[in-house]
Image (cartoon, rainbow, N blue to C red):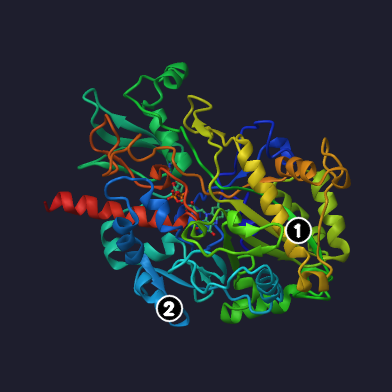
Amino acid sequence: MASLGLLGSSLDWQYKTIPNNISCLSSIGEQCRFSRGKSLGGTTAINHMLYIRGNRYDYDRMNISGWTWKDLEPYFLRYEGLQILDQYPASSRKYHNSNGTMKLEYFDDPRNPWHMRTVEGLKQLNIPYNKDLNGEYQIGVTKVAGYVYKGERMSTARGYLARNDVKKNLKVAKNAFCTEVVIDDDNIARGVTVVQNLQKVTIYARIEIILSAGAIGTPQILMQSGVGPADHLQEMGISVRSNLPVGNDMSDHQLPVVIVKVDHGGIVDSLVGLTSKAPQVLQYLASRSGPLASNSLQDIVTLINTNCYDFDLRQYSGNSSRCELADMQIIQSYIDKGLVALAKPLVKQAIGFNDQVLDQIEKANENHGLIVFSPMVLQPYSRGTVRLASIDPLQPPAIFANYLGDERDVEQMVKSITFLEHLMKTQIFKKHKASILHLNLPGCPAYKCGRVEYWRCYARHMTYSGYHAVGTCALTRVVDEQLRVYGVKNLRVADLSVLKNIIRGNTASVSIAIGERIVDFLTEEDNP
Ligand SMILES: Cc1cc2nc3c(=O)[nH]c(=O)nc-3n(C[C@H](O)[C@H](O)[C@H](O)COP(=O)(O)OP(=O)(O)OC[C@H]3O[C@@H](n4cnc5c(N)ncnc54)[C@H](O)[C@@H]3O)c2cc1C
């Protein structure tokens, strides 16, 4: 529960998606939660800390000069401080670095029995164990490395702000909300306006401005500054500085939350109250180890190409190179028996499902442990948009995520759930009486009346964001290869909004690489 408590907290912008009537139907107001970090370190200060870089092909297929895997790999390696390289196979060495700013280790989750059980179940479906999903091959199940060092979160703030060169050169204005880029009549960016302590201040730039407010914040600031789709800006009464597809083509991982009941031989068999966590709290405080040093997920990740899984034989046969491209990533968390009732307000705040669903989950948890599986659609077809909801820059933007807007994403979710059904039928899961919870959802047929129809409907109700939005100020559409905004001089963007395609993995890795990438653009221009 440790990192779950950050979602919906004051460290989260607490965005919600605009309903599209075909997804997030069991979230409060039919709006999916859309968490984003609101502190130093941005979303790396609240995320789940999993370190997965995506597939090389994800970068190559952008087909943009300077942004292939070969171009980007040095930047991933530059920041990577992998402390556990000696535990990886020798073939992995060339893909990693131990000395970078961002220290990475394994989570300390040694007592969770569902780690080995899940690996064993997946083995029965012929899913390979892969020690390094960021190495030679990307398919398989692994004990995942994370942005965690000595038992504490390794946010980008912890990593970079501790560096002496950064301390010497960087000034941070805390609690300052950027409302606009000041652009003069010649379309040259001159500075930014920020609101700090209820005061509006303009800060002028000596050389240039780099926006790094993420896939939601950056398009919002650009549109407030007159950079965006002309029709939308005119509708909002904003004069157009550069007519660009800002906020378009947002792509995000999406998933159906799948809940599995298991027998209650979990981490703490005799859980009667939060006080029974006391030994774990003490262990964490004394040594930064134990279950609370975990990320509230289990420390395993599975990546699979479902096209290479034989649904009749219930066996994975991913031998060809086409199978190397994962289309599903599974992460999971374990909830001890009775914990939902104890932490219901926290769960509600963090996850945002409505009472009808939460009550059913709470009831199932009365006598069972629960495993919450999140099988992410890694290459979604649905696209969303970010627009201004108000001319007032302090108001949140309109995030139309449009999850499941493309029917193919629903079918992919049904495939993923079918795969999980097969996992539940493996010996080890059967031994622990695992069964997927068939929630009673309004408008959905009963499971026994039509399995596939039920899961399609379920996916539309239990939709959840993967929190990996990209593409709202994409390379070659809004910014050039050097991250300069088209049509405005001295203005660049360096965050996930520039990524044209979503990767097969978790996105903090790329956002940091983009940060390292722009450093070279700037220094190369300073020293041509
Ligand atoms: C719950 C959750 C779990 C996740 N789990 C993982 C994971 O396990 N592994 C992984 O790799 N990725 C994960 N991610 C995704 C990953 O953390 C993000 O994709 C990544 O951090 C985004 O980087 P960014 O630099 O583009 O934006 P952000 O990290 O969001 O940074 C943007 C910064 O700009 C600030 N900002 C925004 N607007 C303004 C404004 N107007 N004025 C001033 N400041 C502003 C924000 O407060 C923030 O500090 C997760 C995300 C979430 C929400």
Quadrant for the N terminus in the image:
bottom right
Rendered image quadrant of residue 402? top right
Q: Is 473 drawn above or below residue 331 in the view shown?
A: above
250 displayed left or right of 476? right
- What amino acid is at disc 2? Leu
Q: Residue at x 57, y 57 (%)?
A: 305
Asked whether 348 or 324 is in front, the reply is 324
Where residue 329 sits in the image (x, y, percent)?
58, 57
Asked whether 157 or 250 is in front, the reply is 250
Indicate the secondary structure of the residue bearing disc 1: helix
44 displayed left or right of 33? left
Residue ID for mark 2 = 85
Rendered image quadrant of residue 515? bottom left
Residue 447 - label: none
Q: Is 388 drawn above or below residue 102 in the view shown?
A: above
From this viewpoint, is residue 293 visible?
Answer: yes
Indicate the secondary structure of the residue bearing disc 2: helix
Where residue 261 sits in the image (x, y, percent)?
81, 62
Q: Earlier in the sequence, mark 1 or mark 2?
A: 2
Where residue 443 sits in the image (x, y, percent)?
82, 35
Residue ID for mark 1 = 421
Rendered image quadrant of residue 47? bottom right
Can you tell which of label 1 and label 2 is closer to the viewer? 1
Q: Give neighbour class at mark 2: few <14, some 14-19, many 20+ (Cα, 10 Å).
A: some
Q: Give neighbour class at mark 1: few <14, some 14-19, many 20+ (Cα, 10 Å).
A: some
Q: Residue at x 82, y 42 (%)?
A: 441
